[in-house]
Amino acid sequence: MSRAPAALSVDDVTALIDESFPQIHAGGRALYIESVADRQARVRLTFSDRLARPGGTISGPAMFTLADFSIYAALIATLGAPAIPAVTTNLNITFLRRPEPRDLVAVTTIIRLGRRLAYAQVELTSDGEEDVVAHATGSYALPAVGSGT
Amino acid sequence: MSRAPAALSVDDVTALIDESFPQIHAGGRALYIESVADRQARVRLTFSDRLARPGGTISGPAMFTLADFSIYAALIATLGAPAIPAVTTNLNITFLRRPEPRDLVAVTTIIRLGRRLAYAQVELTSDGEEDVVAHATGSYALPAVGSGT
Amino acid sequence: MSRAPAALSVDDVTALIDESFPQIHAGGRALYIESVADRQARVRLTFSDRLARPGGTISGPAMFTLADFSIYAALIATLGAPAIPAVTTNLNITFLRRPEPRDLVAVTTIIRLGRRLAYAQVELTSDGEEDVVAHATGSYALPAVGSGT
Amino acid sequence: MSRAPAALSVDDVTALIDESFPQIHAGGRALYIESVADRQARVRLTFSDRLARPGGTISGPAMFTLADFSIYAALIATLGAPAIPAVTTNLNITFLRRPEPRDLVAVTTIIRLGRRLAYAQVELTSDGEEDVVAHATGSYALPAVGSGT
């Protein structure tokens, strides 16, 4: 899997998304892009009581949001600003273990980057742990950006 | 498909979920159970700027939350309080059209209700429209409640 | 859901698919289109030892084949010969019960029929039974046939 | 990801599956387990006209069968004979490119191996190529074999 540098830096990707989707951080910023590479991104969801569920675990919608956001970050990092209009067409998430009440980390790998469609997978782990707590795959419709085949 | 009455009324299901998951309504109540029947539920997500995205559409995570919640409501309506500990094990959502900036309605049908596992499908439409804007299927692990096979 | 007549009859759909994909019936015909309507198809998989698995059940790949074929039949019935080049882009199948060793029936409903993409769901039951043994959703890329939006 | 040796060798896994599911090879053997490791398997589907589709590509059901079989092989390699009764509960496959008319290779990684449930992902490539032609995830119900958590 490629480890070539991304087209954009973490700061650039963060700034682009913040500017385009300020609503994502309504209620306080919880999603932080930690690193990007070509077709890859690593994103942290910081734990807070807002995301907690009884038994000290994390809500499913919060994990969905993290998975979806991390794929989007990998697309922007790889394709740059032209990918901002990309939209999710499918997201399939399987919850494998109850995460502990701490930060979650999502590692996204784009498996297929075509001209009009991208497909990626995401592994979610609790910060500092190896066990995958949730696994997602996502498909995205891309605007015509002239990259890929 | 069964149209037998649910075990619980809309008010009972709403009260049970509110009591067990007060965090769901953090930031203001947006999810309203409109009707329930045996293995079925209809839930409304009221539109607000918080859920909007550029172009006047609704965020993917908000649609995921609605789909997940509506399946959960159908489970509680059908099985009652013993189903409160049910957890989502998989949710697969396909986004078919950009919804307009108005309320969304989710109609859930439970397709399989076993002793330990339930499986359901959900159709999401914009209020007053027929076209499905998103379709989801979900699997849930049930606590041992002695109903179904 | 629409019950308008399909563009083509059962015999027309069967003849078109047989002509385009003779390989489907290699080893003997097992798939029979029973009825079609606008955006709908009902297809039977006849049971034989070839499809059996230990315990007297039916193989997963046979159920996948039935689900995929029935969506394809609904597309051809609705769009006619121009849809022959349609290709499956995703198929998600959940196995809910072990089917008995008898014919399986698939009922497909196309939920979204756009210009370039179709999305459908399929319920598989054992012949004469009501319980769903498997449920699938599928996405298909359509050639430009000028139908739908 | 673990590269520890599997519990069983390629020959042992092949013999166990052949003995339990002789029907898999009806019509001639096309599936060959090439290597196994702890929670991993690599399986080849040899190309033949039987699997071909117009345009010189490979049928979707053949790719489903390969994905499903390769996960099953990884389970048997890791858990041994007690896993023989494992059954597929869900398989989600996304077709990313049309494969060329040559052998396909599936590489499976088991992401979660619990006591009662396993979850895996599979990448399918054309022999000798890097591009993924299809990607699948699968869930399997395990008999109680006392391994994992």
Image: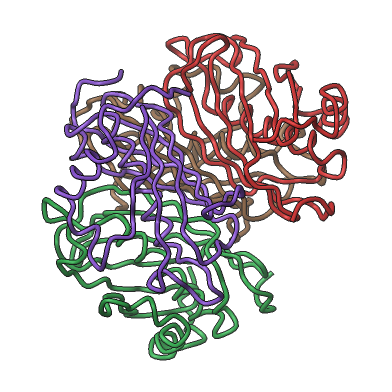
Chain colours: A purple, B green, C brown, D red
Q: Is residue D29 above or below residue C12?
A: above
Would residue C99 be visible to someone looking at this image? Answer: no
Based on the displayed image, in which of its 4 quarters is residue D108 positioned? top right
In the rendered image, the quadrant that contains the N terminus of chain D is top right
Question: How many numbered discs, if any?
Answer: 0
Nearest the eye: A36 or A83:
A36
Nearest the eye: A47 or D100:
A47
Would residue D120 be visible to someone looking at this image? Answer: yes
Q: Horizontal placement of C22 versus C76: left or right?
A: right
Based on the displayed image, in which of its 4 quarters is residue D68 positioned? top right
Please report the residue visible at 40 percent of the width from the left and 60 percent of the height from the top.
A46
Based on the displayed image, in which of its 4 quarters is residue A97 positioned? bottom right
Q: Horizontal placement of D142 versus C96: left or right?
A: right
* x, y percent for residue C34: 49, 41
Q: Horizontal placement of B28 versus D38: left or right?
A: left
Nearest the eye: D21 or A65:
A65
In the rendered image, the quadrant that contains the C terminus of chain D is bottom right
Please report the residue visible at 40 percent of the width from the left and 69 percent of the height from the top.
A48
* x, y percent for residue B120: 49, 62
Please report the residue visible at 34 percent of the width from the left and 66 percent of the height from the top.
B66
* x, y percent for residue A108: 43, 39
Please report the residue visible at 58 percent of the width from the left and 22 percent of the height from the top.
C25
Nearest the eye: C126 or A37:
A37
* x, y percent for residue D91: 57, 42
